Image (spheres, rainbow, N blue to C red):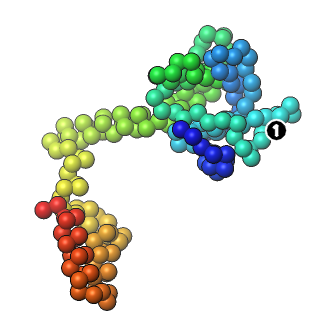
Amino acid sequence: MKFNEKELAEASSGPAELEGRLNHKRAHKSGFKERWFKLKGNLLFYFNTNEFGQIDKRQPTGVIILENCNVNVDTSDGVFAFSITFRDEHEKRHVLSVRTESQVEQWVTALRQASYEYWRSKLIVLQERLCKKTGKDPLLMYPRNQGVVRDEAWEATPTFRSHVRSFKSSVVPSSTLNTITREVNLIEFS
C-alpha cells in the first residue's frame, strides 16, 4: 500500500489508542533504535527521536499496517520484547522492546486487537452465541425485514426513504417523479 507523505502525516495526527517510546529493530538489522510509536486503528506509526529524546511528530518515519500479522512475546534477546511477523513475509519481522513486562502485555494486547481479523473473529463468536440463543442469524434478520425494525428503532434520525419522501414532495417534474418511484421500489426487499 502506498501513501504520500502528506496523507501519512495527516493520518498519524490526533489522539491514539496507545502511544509510547519503544526500541525498534528490523529482523535483518542488529541493533535497536529508540522510536516513538503511535497506534491508530490498525496503523502503527513510528517517529524519530533526537539525541535529547525529543519526538519529531511532524512526519512519521514509517507505518506498520497490522493486518495478516502475528504479535507475540519475544524472549530471544533477553529483554522485555515482542515481535510483529507477517504471514506471507517473514523477512519483514519487527522486534520492539519496552521497559517492563506489563508494558509488553499492554502493547501485545492492543496490537492484537487492532486488526480487522480480530474484530471479525469477535463478530463471528457473538453471532454464533446469538444464533444459539435465538435460533436466528442476527446479521441476516434486520437487512431483510423491509426496514420495519430499523425504521422503528431509529425513527428520529432521517433515513434514505425519508429523504426520498421529502424529495418526492418537493416540486419535481412528473417524469422525474416516476423515475424516483421506480428506484425506491427497487430498493425495497419485497
Q: Pick out the residue farthest to the bottom.
A: 171
Q: Secondary structure at mark 1?
A: loop
Q: Residue furthest left?
A: 190
- Give the residue number, with chain letter if any, for mark 1: 54
Residue in the picture at 25% in, 75% down? 180
- Asked if residue 103 lies left or right of residue 67, the reply is right
Q: Which residue of the protein is positioned furthest toward the front in this rendering?
A: 175
Q: Amino acid at mark 1?
A: Gln
Front-lying residue, 151 or 172: 172
Please identify the quarter of the rendering in which residue 49 is found.
Answer: top right
**Residue at image point 56% right, 18% down:** 91
Query: Can residue 101 be seen in the rendering of this structure?
Result: no
Q: Position of residue 48 (x, y in %)?
A: 75, 35
Residue 85 placed where, x, y %?
Answer: 53, 22
In the image, is residue 27 above or below residue 130?
above
The one of 110 and 185 positioned closer to us in this rendering: 185
In the image, residue 41 lies at what x, y percent?
A: 53, 42
Residue 183's place in the image compared with 44, above or below, is below
Left or right: 21 in relation to 156? right
Residue at the image position 24 percent from the left and 36 percent from the top: 128
What x and y, as percent, mark residue 127? Answer: 27, 40
